[in-house]
Image (spheres, coloured by chain):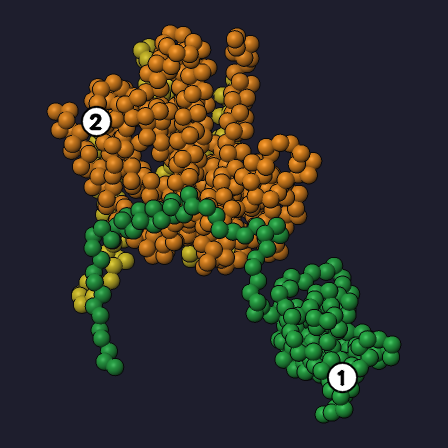
Chain colours: A yellow, B green, C orange
């Protein structure tokens, strides 16, 4: 009962601040709304007993990524400018995203596989995101390929940044 | 002189990690941590003031207790910020110092104006005004910061000089060779 | 003594009481640290430091001059001043964020302490129980996660002040904190690789780290500072940077940025930043001690349980769980206070790094060093468990 109330509280907080990210005119306020939204997501993870994911969410996204966003926003001095909230492309994109979301929800409710799988498992279910061990095992067995691909992507991005930001003196063709 | 180019030595690995230097610094500060403090607890303990110190200007008396100032007003004239005000006065005939030309009736030094330049002491023909070891002047009103004659003599006290200029002059006058 | 009435209380009341108790201890210690800072700086520089303030009503108490000389009343007077003086909000600031920033500074500073164990006692079954507000399995990660939110207070304070120096301080702080978080996290990984040997439970709990350092035998009882000195060193340097202490106090370097992010702050809001900084220091040193200095164990190779058992032979009341808990907390607090003294000692010894030096140390020296350290220990641990 109380966890239901908490769920609704944090769900409203998450979605509300996510809306604020998009609608806010001030970029710094947007970034801070994103921060609140991420903390809300972490709280939802806690309600799901996925403490590890919650901590990682706060540590990586709320702690570092949004701080970098803020850093860039301040460095580029773009805050305070009036941003037009809705352009034509924005409306098309959001309509597309909404359609995708509805589609996903519909397939999800039609199949209802989550409900059956949890009730079917009579033995103890260890949430993947709860303990370090379960999480690590899943990461290095079931999801090994996605992890490798994501790691590779990040490596490429990092190399790209290094190439872009490094000045190559005496190498005309690289420029 | 020939310019000598000194090659800057490259830092060694230990120096580049900063660690030996940091440890050396920590040792020094720890040594000072356990040493006794050197601070003077000011209002209770007073610093020793040098004899040459030039603090607040004061008026002095000679060893016989005669006020030295003859209110010539040279100091008033020379004072750059015009901090000194002198009202000259006659010495009554029945005074033991009646042979002296004059004495100040009032002598005020405004310490809010005084810049401690020492020109008054420099110019005084009687060595009557002295910048002495008084270094702290405080008051809660403007009037309090003006030193009047009584206060100036209280601060100044007596200087042990043995000139006795006016007594010698009087003796000479009595013996008939005034100049 | 019977404490059953306490355990009959509803859970939420108990948790609230425990939380309040910890905050009521942490907050005054953080405040007292500010006086300790002034006293230590004074003693290092050959001065007596604040030693004159005393309420006239108390002056007749014999022996009270010791408190006066230690500046205790000065601390109380300063604290009272912060509460009662005018709290200015300069014109042109972004009011909401300007007021939110000091509050945001306090939240992570006080909430990280929930997952930090600060003692242990043996229950009736002879099992060691940690004294902690929330004994979660991911303790270390939770500390890192919540304390990483502290950077927003600095950024927001700098940005909302609408003034150049605070802004520069805020930007510097964000870059610095993110840079050193990496090395800090990487430096503790060998510790947890060592603990989470194959077949083990798999944990990030700080209590388990201390348990691991209180095992019998030469290798079992060795603190991690002996087995992993490089990790401890990297963690310590990163801790200095993360808590914005000298020689890394870029965000508020007063010689080039006036006061950094809190230039425009005054009175109570400023004191919140101040206390938050010391809370960060306390929690940071607590984690450092738990990880590398054996937590509440009095000496390397001497565990709390052993020493209490030895004491129980002499003093009958030493076997009581309450005594053991108090002893553990006292030892742990003593270590924390020494660590804070070390922070201050370093502050009054070293000059500040230049900003480019800070970035160079963080990215070009400390990060490769911590990665190399991690790889070396990973290989070593893998070989050991072969």
For the point 20% across and 68% down, the residue is: B7
For the point 32% across and 13% down, the residue is: A124
Q: Evaluate whether residue A14 shows in this view.
A: no
Quadrant (top left, top right, bottom left, bottom right) of the C terminus of chain C: top left
- Residue neighbourhood size for the residue with mark 2, other residues' Cα within 10 Å, grouped as few (<14), some (14–19), many (≥20): few
Is B57 displayed left or right of C224 in the figure? right
For the residue pair B82 and A5, the one nearer the viewer reads as: B82
Mark 1 on the same chain as mark 2: no
For the point 34% across and 43% down, the residue is: C238
**Given the image, what chain letter belongs to the residue carrying mark 2?**
A
Residue that lies at the very extreme toward the front in this rendered image? B175
The numbered disc on residue C291 is: none
For the residue pair C162 and B145, the one nearer the viewer reads as: B145
Report the residue marked by disc 2.
A141
Residue B104, image x and y in percent? Answer: 79, 77
The vertical placement of B127 against A143, above or below, is below
Q: Quadrant of residue B86?
A: bottom right
The vertical placement of C6 against B176, above or below, is above
Report the residue marked by disc 1.
B170
For the residue pair C276 and A93, the one nearer the viewer reads as: C276
The vertical placement of A18 against B2, above or below, is above
Residue at mark 1 to residue at mark 2: CA–CA distance: 120 Å
Q: Nearer the viewer, mark 1 or mark 2?
A: 1
Residue C112, image x and y in percent? Answer: 44, 32
For the point 22% across and 58% down, the residue is: B11
Q: Are marks 1 and 2 in contact (CB under 8 Å)?
A: no
For the residue pair C255 and C11, the one nearer the viewer reads as: C255
Is A172 displayed left or right of C290 in the figure? left
Residue B165, image x and y in percent? Answer: 70, 81
Q: Quadrant of residue A164?
A: bottom left
User: Of helix, strand and loop, which one carries label 1?
Assistant: helix
- Residue neighbourhood size for the residue with mark 1, other residues' Cα within 10 Å, grouped as few (<14), some (14–19), many (≥20): some
């Amino acid at each position: 009962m109380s966890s239901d109330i908490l769920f609704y509280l944090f769900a409203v907080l998450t979605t509300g601040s996510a809306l604020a990210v998009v609608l806010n005119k001030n970029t710094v306020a947007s970034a801070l709304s994103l921060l609140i939204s991420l903390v809300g997501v972490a709280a939802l993870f806690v309600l799901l007993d996925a403490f590890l994911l919650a901590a990682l969410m706060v540590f990586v996204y709320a702690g570092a990524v949004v701080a970098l966003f803020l850093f860039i926003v301040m460095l580029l001095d773009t805050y305070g400018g009036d941003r037009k909230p809705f352009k034509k492309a924005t409306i098309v994109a959001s309509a597309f995203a909404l359609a995708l979301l509805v589609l996903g929800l519909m397939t999800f409710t039609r199949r209802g596989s989550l409900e059956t799988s949890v009730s079917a498992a009579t033995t103890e279910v260890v949430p993947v995101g709860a303990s370090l061990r379960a999480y690590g095992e899943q990461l290095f067995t079931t999801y090994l390929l996605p992890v490798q691909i994501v790691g590779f992507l990040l490596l490429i991005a990092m190399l790209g940044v290094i190439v872009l930001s490094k000045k190559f003196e005496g190498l005309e063709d690289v420029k | 002189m020939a310019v000598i180019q000194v090659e800057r030595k490259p830092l060694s690995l230990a120096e580049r990690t900063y660690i030996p230097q940091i440890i050396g610094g920590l040792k020094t500060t720890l040594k000072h941590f356990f040493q006794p403090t050197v601070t003077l607890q000011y209002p209770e303990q007073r610093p020793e003031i040098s004899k040459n110190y030039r603090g607040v200007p004061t008026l002095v008396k000679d060893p016989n207790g005669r006020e030295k100032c003859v209110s010539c007003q040279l100091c008033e004239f020379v004072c750059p910020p015009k901090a000194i005000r002198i009202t000259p006065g006659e010495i009554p005939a029945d005074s033991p110092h009646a042979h002296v030309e004059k004495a100040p009736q009032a002598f005020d030094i405004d310490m809010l104006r005084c810049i401690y330049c020492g020109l008054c002491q420099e110019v005084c023909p009687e060595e009557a005004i002295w910048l002495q070891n008084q270094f702290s002047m405080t008051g809660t009103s403007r009037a309090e910061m003006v030193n009047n004659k009584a206060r100036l003599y209280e601060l100044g006290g007596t200087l042990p000089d043995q000139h006795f200029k006016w007594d010698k002059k009087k003796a000479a006058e009595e013996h008939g060779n005034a100049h | 003594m019977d404490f059953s009435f306490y355990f009959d209380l509803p859970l939420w009341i108990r948790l609230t009481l425990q939380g309040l108790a910890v905050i009521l201890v942490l907050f005054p210690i953080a405040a007292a640290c500010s006086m300790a800072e002034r006293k230590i700086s004074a003693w290092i520089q050959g001065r007596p430091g604040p030693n004159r303030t005393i309420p006239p009503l108390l002056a007749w108490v014999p022996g009270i001059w010791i408190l006066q000389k230690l500046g205790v009343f000065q601390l109380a007077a300063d604290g009272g001043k912060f509460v009662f003086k005018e709290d200015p909000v300069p014109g042109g600031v972004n009011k909401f964020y300007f007021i939110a920033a000091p509050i945001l500074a306090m939240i992570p500073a006080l909430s990280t302490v929930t997952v930090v164990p600060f003692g242990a006692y043996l229950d009736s079954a002879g099992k060691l129980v940690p004294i902690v507000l929330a004994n979660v399995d991911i303790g270390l990660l939770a500390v890192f996660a919540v304390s990483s939110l502290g950077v927003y207070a600095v950024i927001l304070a700098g940005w909302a002040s609408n003034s150049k120096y605070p802004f520069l301080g805020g930007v510097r702080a964000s870059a610095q904190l993110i840079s050193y978080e990496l090395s800090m996290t990487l430096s503790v990984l060998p510790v947890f690789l060592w603990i989470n040997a194959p077949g083990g439970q798999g944990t990030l709990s700080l209590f388990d780290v201390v348990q691991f350092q209180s095992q019998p035998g030469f290798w079992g009882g060795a603190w991690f500072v002996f087995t992993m000195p490089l990790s401890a060193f990297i963690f310590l340097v990163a801790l200095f940077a993360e808590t914005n202490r000298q020689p890394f106090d870029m965000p508020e370097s007063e010689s080039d940025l006036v006061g950094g992010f809190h230039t425009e702050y005054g009175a109570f809001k400023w004191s919140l930043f101040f206390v938050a900084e010391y809370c960060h220091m306390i929690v940071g040193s607590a984690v450092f001690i738990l990880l590398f200095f054996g937590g509440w164990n009095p000496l390397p190779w001497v565990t709390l349980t052993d020493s209490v058992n030895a004491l129980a032979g002499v003093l009958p009341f030493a076997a009581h769980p309450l005594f053991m808990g108090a002893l553990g907390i006292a030892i742990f607090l003593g270590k924390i206070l020494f660590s804070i003294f070390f922070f201050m000692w370093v502050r009054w010894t070293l000059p500040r790094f230049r900003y480019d030096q800070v970035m160079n140390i963080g990215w070009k020296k400390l990060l490769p060093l911590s990665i190399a350290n991690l790889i070396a220990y990973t290989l070593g641990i893998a070989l050991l468990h072969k």
